[in-house]
Image: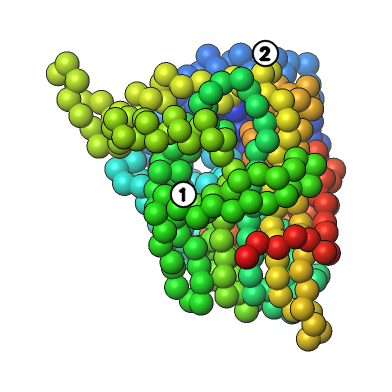
Amino acid sequence: MGKVLIIGCGGIANVAIRKCCQNSQVFEEIMIASRTKAKCDALKAKLAGGKTKIHTAKVDASQVDEVIALINDFQPDAVLHLALPYQNLTIMEACLATKTHYIDTATYESPDAVKFEYQWQWAYRQRFQEAGICAILGCGFDPGVTGVFAAYAQKHFFDEIYHLDILDANAGNNGYPFSTNFNPEINIREITANGYYWENGKWVKTKPLEIKKLYDFPQIGEKEIYLLYHEELESLALHLKGIKRIRFFMTFRKSELNYLKCLEEVGMTAIEPIDFNGQQIVPLQFLKAVLPDPAALGAKTKGKTNIGCLFQGTKDGRKRNYYLYNVCDHEKSYREVESQAVSYTTGVPAMIGAMLLLNGTWNKPGVYNVEEFDPDPFMSALNQWGLPWLQDFNPELLD
């Protein structure tokens, strides 16, 4: 059915690429491109013999001209961006120049400041409309599936949603006292930033990890969860009818937080360059280089993740509570695609979004977040492609 250029070859890309190859009826031909072509070649070798035709290439996705040249050479129907969110805007520029559809899994983030907002990418709406191409933003799990969950709840179960709490719990254990669930640089920047949540039409600011609660998650038990800012709050605040409050919570092990506090206090999480032996280095980038690579943790990780949305609102004049979530097993994920569940839960939705774009189900000129499309085809695909969802109409609520 189509050709897709996949930029990136880390943990999430590994999952998405393998799922594309499982779905060869849609993904007839793909190109894997990253700074390190050898990684792309190694993955291609592992997937040899399948029906999807695979190419590889080297590209610096921060250079618009390089991405344009690669797109012109391969002529894909869409670009699936699974590298760093620093590169969102350069890849979007390349897609505009070549009139190629675009998909990513996380909002743009500036390398010079901890400030990730959709406004940078929303500014491309008119240009994408005029070019007749579609951009789907944040098509991972959170953001991504959480937005689809919200659209599904709003479509089928609520007249108005007043409160939404997004809960992201990872009960996996890989044996390391300190590691991150995905790219360490991006993950640590998010955790150490101020928290924000949306309430009564404005943003409420909190100190990093200031708000902590306890929640009893299905299949994984009670976990401490901490309030963070997450980019889907920004888009969902615009798109959910009647919304009064949206919050995002994530779990962390105590050992992780203790290590993180020490690293922060000694300056290792700083993003401003420092001089070291006559060279300018960014402490957080150096820390990333010495931490375990999340893409290599799959074989060691045991346990499950539970990510979902807890809704409160009304239907036909009556109050309603609703919990929609997914549980994913680290070991099962590794057996299927040689990745842990955090990468799996992001890579599978990325493939699904690309599939819906290619087959025309989610395809209209402009720039969109996932909750702006019909959620039903995506929800059906989650069950088909490895992320079945569960629901509870009498869930425990957060205060």
Q: What residue is rendered at 68% in x and 73% in y? A: 161
Residue 2: name its quadrant. top right
**What is the secondary structure assignment of the residue under circle 2?**
helix
Q: Position of residue 371 (x, y in %)?
A: 65, 62
Q: Position of residue 267 (x, y in %)?
A: 28, 32
Query: Looking at the image, is 119 positioned above or below residue 63?
Result: below
Q: Position of residue 77 (x, y in %)?
A: 62, 43
Q: Position of residue 136 (x, y in %)?
A: 59, 53
- Name the kind of residue labelled 2 in the image: Ala
Mark 2 sits on what residue? 45
Q: What residue is rendered at 40% in x and 43% in y? A: 192
Residue 396: name its quadrant. bottom right
Please tell me how crowded label 2 is: few (under 14), some (14-19), or many (20+) other residues with Cα within 10 Å: few
Quick check: 208 left or right of 350?
A: left
Q: Quadrant of the N terminus?
A: top right
Please tell me how many numbered marks the rendered image carries: 2
Query: Looking at the image, is 115 positioned above or below residue 329?
Result: below
User: Can the viewer see residue 58?
Assistant: no
Q: What is the spatial separation of the Cα atoms under label 2 and label 1, in whole angstroms? A: 43 Å
Query: Looking at the image, is 290 positioned above or below residue 269?
Result: above
The answer to whether marks 2 and 1 mark residues whose Cβ atoms lie closer than 8 Å is no
Quick check: 309 left or right of 11?
A: right
* Disc on res. 209: 1
Please tell me how crowded label 1 is: few (under 14), some (14-19), or many (20+) other residues with Cα within 10 Å: some
Q: Quadrant of the C terminus?
A: bottom right
- Name the kind of residue labelled 1 in the image: Leu
Of residue 345 and residue 322, the one placed in the foreground of this image is 322
